[in-house]
Image (spheres, helix red, strand yellow):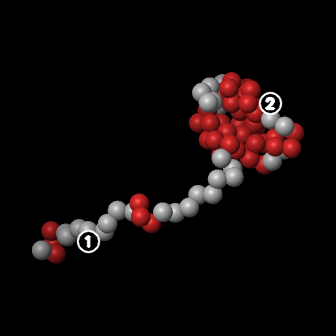
Amino acid sequence: MLVTLLDAATYATALPKKESDCAEWQAAIEALILVANSRTGPTMLAGIGVMKAINRHEERVFNPDRKGPHWGKRKLLRDR
């Protein structure tokens, strides 16, 4: 479990060369370096980059069953 940015950096540096060369990990590592150097950088951006790199093989699929029912348009006062 990655809790801090230090955990994420340690995890990223321990990756094999083949895996760390992919574009997702390069972007995540670059965001981690940016946050570490500036200390005021977008820490959320680094976290999102690491999560996208970890889950890069997961395909997001739209589930239409999760969509709520449509109950009709809202009636305006002028249309009553």
Image coordinates of residue 31 in percent, x first then y, are 71, 37
Residue that carries the numbered disc 1 in the rendered image: 72
Q: Is residue 33 left or right of residue 42?
A: right
Identify the amino acid type marked 2: Ala
In percent of the image, x 81 and y 47: which residue is there? 22
Which mark's residue is nearer the viewer, 2 or 1? 2
Instruction: Say whether disc 2 or disc 1 marks the residue closer to the N-terminus.
Output: 2
Image coordinates of residue 20 in percent, x first then y, are 81, 41
Q: Nearer the viewer, residue 43 or 24?
A: 24
Marks 2 and 1, how far apart in space? 54 Å
Under circle 1, the secondary element is loop
Under circle 2, the secondary element is loop
In percent of the image, x 15 and y 68: which residue is there? 77
Badge 2: how crowded within 10 Å, few (<14), some, or many (20+)? few
In percent of the image, x 80 and y 35: which residue is there? 15
Could you say which quadrant of the image residue 11 lies in?
Answer: top right
Residue at the bottom extreme of this rendering: 79
Residue at the right extreme of this rendering: 17
Q: Is residue 57 above or below residue 27?
A: below
Could you say which quadrant of the image residue 1 lies in?
Answer: top right
Residue 49 seen by the camera: no
Residue that carries the numbered disc 2 in the rendered image: 14
Residue 77 seen by the camera: yes
Q: Is residue 54 left or right of residue 3?
A: right
Residue at the left extreme of this rendering: 80
Image coordinates of residue 18 in percent, x first then y, are 86, 44
Q: Is residue 51 above or below residue 76?
A: above
Identify the amino acid type marked 1: Gly
